[in-house]
Image (tube, rainbow, N blue to C red):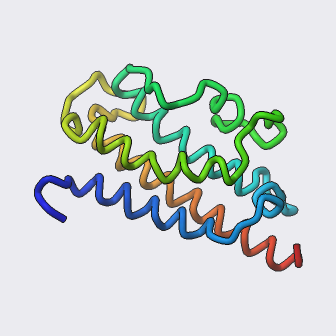
Amino acid sequence: MTSSQPNILVQVETYREWALGALEGVTEAEANFIPTGFRNNIRWNVGHLYLDQYLWIETVTREKIQVLPDEFHQWFGFGTSPSNFQPDTPTLTELIPYLRNQPIDIREQFSNRLDETFPPTEMGMRTIEQVLSRTIFHEGMHLQAILDLKKCILSQSF
């Protein structure tokens, strides 16, 4: 890490690489399968990770992020499930580039604004850096969900 790379951005990039690594070799059929005991599938978790990170940045900055398609809210928002998917909902193959490019986009758009102070969110976050810290935790939760889904899929001889 160099001084031009704030640690929080390095963490965002590193943990995203872990999530992308967990998706290697996952087929579309596996990404769409919901094992018994689960509410969502791998595909939903991937879209939700992408959406959530931008939503929290939008929440703290109160600025619309242009790269976030409006439909992602209905497909991958809090409380949604694959039952909300439509024929035009992105496939896993289509979602992976979104996930891969998001840390780059965040670095380009927000690296100079990490410490900028905004009115607090309902969780008391006032900076983009605080939001990214929260979304890293969230990413870890969904990475574990993806790993658990993969284990179930493998154990069911999918």
Tell how many labels.
0
| Quarter of the image where one finds residue 2 | bottom left
Image quarter where the C terminus lies is bottom right
Eyeballing the image, is 130 above or below 100?
above
Residue 56 position, x and y percent, is 44, 34
| The N terminus - image quarter | bottom left
Q: Position of residue 104 (x, y in %)?
A: 37, 48
> For the point 49% across and 53% down, which residue is it?
100
Name the residue nearer the viewer: 123 or 132.
Answer: 132
Q: Is residue 55 above or below residue 137?
A: above
- Write the residue at 59% across / 57% down: 142
Closest to the observer, 120 or 140: 140
Give how far across and how far down residue 90 sits, in percent: 70, 42
Q: Is residue 82 depicted above or below 34 in this figure?
A: above
* Side of 148 where 14 appears, left or right: left
Task: Identify the residue at image location x=64%, y=36%.
Answer: 78
Q: Is residue 2 left or right of residue 75?
A: left
Residue situated in front as seen by the camera: 81 or 103? 103
State the residue in front, 100 or 77: 100
